[in-house]
Amino acid sequence: MNENFESLFVKCDCGTHMLEVQRYYEDIHDQGFYLTFWHYGRVNRPMSLRERMRWCWRILRTGDPWADGIIANNETAKKISDYITKYL
């Protein structure tokens, strides 16, 4: 019974990430929202050895690289809130 819900895409204020919010509904007991962070990519320059070691050390210590997030101004936060509230 999964209906097709239109996704909401909001761009991060920093300009390098995007958040996708999509409603899912399988049945009354299996419903919610998918939240997906998209990354636009790196600047076309190689990562320094120091930066590579920093990333490796982070992964060795925690088991995963940094979690990502977005910066949302008030207008963007309202769009996200309105989308979620619409389906609750």
Image (cartoon, grey):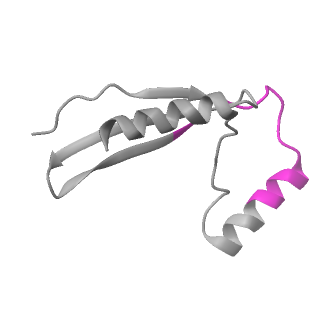
Query: Magenta segment range?
Result: 37-55
Query: Picture coordinates of residue 48 (x, y %)?
Result: 88, 45
Q: Quadrant of residue 25?
A: top left
Q: Is residue 3 above or below residue 32?
A: above
| Nearer-the-camera pick, 3 or 54 | 3
Quadrant the C terminus occupies: top left
Is residue 67 shown to the viewer in this render?
yes
| Residue at x-position 56% and y-position 33% | 78
Residue 86 is left or right of residue 52, and the answer is: left
Asked if residue 22 is positioned above or below residue 48 in the image, the reply reads above
Q: Which residue: 70% across, 33% down?
A: 73
Is 3 on the left-hand or right-hand side of 36? left
Residue 86 lies in quadrant: top left
Front residue of 64/32: it is 32
The image position of residue 16, as x and y in percent, is 70, 30
Occupied quadrant, residue 61:
bottom right
Towards the viewer: 44 or 75: 75
